[in-house]
Image (spheres, rainbow, N blue to C red):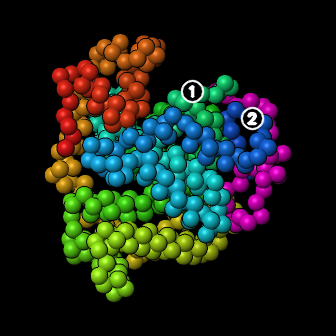
Amino acid sequence: MQPARKRNFRGAMDKRFARADLAPYAADAARSPGRLVAEPPSPTRSEFQRDRDRIVHSTAFRRLADKTQVFVHHEGDHFRTRLTHTIEVAQIARALARALKLDDDLAEAVALGHDLGHTPFGHTGEDALDACMAGHGGFDHNSQALRIVTELERRYAEFDGLNLMQPTVSGLVKHNGPLVDPSGAPSERYRKRGLSEAILRYDRLQPLDLSRQPSLEAQAAAIADDIAYDAHDMDDGLRAGLFTLVDIRAAVPFVDGLLSEIDDRYPKLEEPRVIHELTRRVITRFIEDVIHETGQLISEAKIDSPEAVGAASRPLVGHSAAMAEADRDIKAFLFARMYRHPSVQRARDQADAIVRRLFEAYLADPSTMPTDWAAKAGQGERARAVADYIAGMTDRFAIHEHARLFDGSPELR
């Protein structure tokens, strides 16, 4: 990370791309701290459009194509990867932002970047790497996403990272809510171990307002992530045969109601089409509910500026009570019947072993990593360099590396 330059080009650019269609509480690039390293304006794109494009063109984004969502790539080409999930989150975030008259480019940028820090093998890989890093500051995919967009991507001539706008960086770090309370104490999620050094270091260079609510655009990206998980994990689980429509219908009243609608309108519809109808209706109902509920919350709180959003006592993008209950029911069902399904758990256990063995091998002998990564391990904290290398791997590459260093690899089935 590099200190900000004194030059500031924001004014000329932002006037050219000012949008009259946005609500007064939408994020405003012209009023934000801008980029850590000042750059001349683009003649064709707004600042948040540039951020979105830089994320899409990053190496970390491309690698999401072969990183697990729930199933590993061996399970079939039609199940979702971390990349397809990310694209679906971005679509939902855009829909929410446009309906609420927010900056949809910022919402899309945060959505597209929210999973950049994920390891191979989904949350299993993250948990394994976090355990390996227990004595070295731990591992968290949100702080890893920050490190990717501010340090680890090394493509541009004038700076490390992607040099994103402050609202984009802030949205990536705290889209799920403030990281500290007004006194500076870590929030519940970070209370046990504290905030990562990467977040604290960047916050000293360019404050991220860690105690304030995220922008409405970042909140839209966060709830879009939840909606996508609910709908698409349900879709994948049904098509994989981990549970049936009868199973989820009996456990989740919201889903039962939607299936009744489908049965009434299409009484002889074949099951694959029923599953698709269910998936699209889940997404639609959640989106419509969030739009209505958020509009009420904004009105009740008399929110009239981005600053008022940050000062709010609670998130403003959310579900109604009824839909929040449906969300909890779906997540509880998926946790029990999908994420803890014996076949998925077997693959999780094997993936955990791969990550842990790779970490131990590289830590013991950094020369087994590529030359540039071995050099990084020798220049600074070895464990962090090893974690960075593993976190950047795809599922396929991690399996290949395990087979190279050890006698074979599990099939993750």
Indicate the quadrant where residue 413 lies.
top left
Image location of residue 406, percent across then percent down: 21, 21
Magenta: predominant secondary structure element?
loop
Query: Which residue range is magenta in the image?
Result: 1-30
Residue 235 placed where, x, y %? 33, 63
* Residue annotated with mark 2: 39
- The numbered disc on residue 154 is 1
Q: CA distance from mark 1 to mark 2?
A: 17 Å
| Residue at x 73% of width, y 47% of height | 45
Find numbered disc 1 in the image and state the secondary structure of the residue it sits on. Answer: loop
Residue lying at 21% horizontally and 54% vertically, measured from the top left: 340
Disc 2 crowd, CA 10 A, few/some/many (<14, 14-19, 20+): some
In the figure, residue 307 lies in which quadrant? bottom right
Instruction: Examine the rendering and report whether any part of residue 181 can be seen.
Output: no
**Badge 1 amino acid:** Arg
Residue 7 inside the magenta-drawn segment:
yes
Q: Position of residue 411 (x, y in %)?
A: 20, 37
Q: Is residue 354 visible?
A: yes
- In which quadrant of the rendered image does the N terminus lie? top right
Q: In the rendered structure, does residue 189 fall within the stretch colored magenta?
A: no
Image-based side of 364 in relation to 48, left or right: left
Q: Which residue sits at x=43%, y=51%?
A: 84
Q: Nearer the viewer, residue 315 or 251?
A: 251
The residue lying toward the viewer, choosing from 144 and 371, is: 371
Of the image marks 1 and 2, the number of the one nearer the N terminus: 2
